[in-house]
Image (cartoon, rainbow, N blue to C red):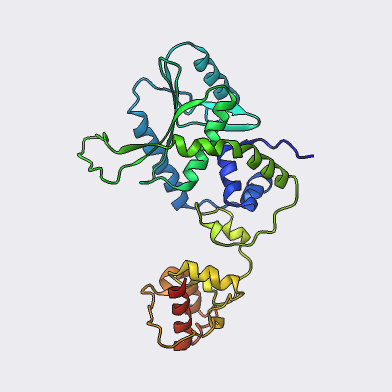
Amino acid sequence: MSTTHFLSKSKILSGWQCHKKLWLEIHDPEQAEIDASKERIFEIGHQVGEIARRLFPDGLLIGHEKHLPQALAATEQRLAAPGPVTLFEPALRHAGVLIRADILIRDAENQIRLIEVKAATKVKPVNYIDCAVQAWVLAGLELHPARVDLAHVDNQFVYPGGGDYQGLIAFEDVTDKVAPMLEHVPAWLEEYRGMLDGEVPPIEIGPQCRNPYDCAFLNYCTPPQPDYPVRCLPGGKKAVWQLLEEGVEDIRDVPPPPSRDLPMVVPRRRADQEHPETRRQIDAGGAHPPPVLSTDHCASFCSWVMAA
């Protein structure tokens, strides 16, 4: 029988991206690596969220980011009071699933509006799942959303200065796209909780490691590499994954192109610019010298890029 693993919205999204990612987040989180670029992305997200809140001056911030019981209690207290209310970061839990909604609005007619804020400039498929999980929790608490919005950055916005960000946030109604997904949430939960009861899933690295988000466990999951891995080749990531699926890991093993009539597209960026540490090791005599790659090697990879 499956253990009732308590899951947050973000954990469910991790499971949707990769079972192994979710398993590691629950059972072996210390293997994650959060670099400065990811921290910067988080910071930008917080800034956009703060700007979105300014559009609702009557809103109340629940807070208690590190104290879940207090956040749940404060949210329950605010929602128990009659009348309209706008809450920022309310904490709600249903059937072992926790969410912290970006913005939750209850109007004078008791209609619920859920707003998920993203720092992106367009809606992505994963955003619908994000909203579906939140809407499912709300529905389970008898707070059925009448409208679900995705608030994102308007790429046509021109900053006039003076701290005026009016117009930066665009709202897209995704209610109709989210509603049919709610019935699938229980199956997702059963699948993920069952998986978490077992051993680490034997999933190899692949496109899911960077789609829809870069995985913090990528380095941990990456097996030992050859001296000249195809993964270090700039550009053509789709072609790289295809080569790996074919069992080709070393640049020198890239098969010859099917036709020498194919036009060649040579990546402009140098490998040593993308991997300065390797270049320093080579210069210091601490690594093998770079292989002598024939034009066949270059043509082979370029043909893979063009075919991908």
Res. 172 in view: yes
Residue at screen point 66% across, 35% down: 6
| Residue 211 higher or lower than 51, as above or below | below
Q: Where is residue 205 in the image (x, y as percent from the top left)?
A: 60, 62
Q: Position of residue 65 (x, y in %)?
A: 52, 30
Give 53 or 264, whichever is nearer the viewer: 264
| Residue 269 higher or lower than 219, as above or below | below
Residue 148 relative to residue 28: left or right = left
| Residue 87 higher or lower than 204, as above or below | above
Residue at screen point 63% across, 42% down: 188
Residue 254 relative to residue 53: left or right = right
Give 266 or 171, whichever is nearer the viewer: 171
Q: In which quarter of the image is the N terminus?
A: top right
Q: Position of residue 212 (x, y in %)?
A: 50, 52
Res. 67 in view: no
- How many badges with numbers are in the image? 0
